[in-house]
Amino acid sequence: MKWIGNRISYVDQEHKTTFVIIPENPGIVKSLIGAWFCMWVVIGGTLIWAWTYYPMKRELHLVMVVFMVFWFYYFLRVGRSFFWLMFGKEMLKIDKISLTIKNSIKGYGKAKEFYIENISKVRVHIPESNSFQAAWENSPWIRGGERIEFDYMGKTIRFGRKLDEKETKLLFQVITKRLDDHLRKKKH
């Protein structure tokens, strides 16, 4: 097993290369997002309890429904970010036929396969450091911030969440070399 920085490991085998990218580890941020998530669950539980226990007028029911929709949206967003920080990882596999990407939380997640001959324009996408996009993608409650992208049959596919510039460039070099090697072998 070889390492690129502290977050990316990869294994070269004869017919495939596998990569594992783990999320960054901001200890205090995990605690804060975990506390926020727990408080959000308590708020939702309290509202559901109040809904079933207290008699309410129709107007209050409407307000509760609107708030519960709002609550549920943020419950999903914060929950997914928290569980991603705690148990998530990106897994990539390059073999003779395809590049497979799987975003996994505790082993759960759907693997997506992209055939090598249909992959084009592999590139690095790093936003300017002073831009709004960079600030947004570096926020701890956002899972995104993918740094490597390629075109695949009219769509742009991205991976490499919140990698720094050095890790991104090194991963880009290894991936493009492996893709080129497999394409050359396939043509011969």
Image (spheres, helix red, strand yellow):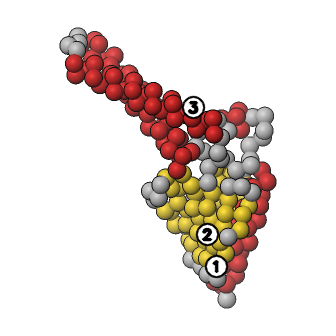
Q: Inspect this view and state whether residue 90 appears.
A: yes
Q: Earlier in the sequence, mark 2 or mark 1?
A: 1
Q: Nearer the viewer, mark 3 or mark 1?
A: 3
Residue at disc 2, secondary structure: strand
- Nearest the viewer among 87 and 135 is 87
x and y percentages locating residue 92 in the rendered image: 59, 64
**Residue type marked 2:** Thr
Counting residues from the start of the chain, the first of labels 2 and 3 encountered is 2
Q: Position of residue 81 (x, y in %)?
A: 53, 41
Residue under the point 47% across and 58% down:
107
- Mark 3 surroundings within 10 Å by alpha-carbon count, few (fewer than 14), some (14 through 19), many (20 or more): few
**Quarter of the figure with the C terminus:** bottom right
- Residue closest to the far bottom: 188
For disc 2, the marked residue is: 18
**Which quadrant of the figure has residue 27?**
top right
Circle 1: element type: loop
Foreground residue among 160 and 105: 105
Q: Which residue is mark 1?
A: 13
Q: Is residue 186 above or below residue 135?
A: below
Callout 1 amino acid: Gln
Q: Which residue is mark 3?
A: 32
Q: Is residue 132 above or below residue 115?
A: above
Rendered location of residue 101, percent (x, y): 55, 62
Which comes sooner in the sequence, label 3 or label 1?
A: 1
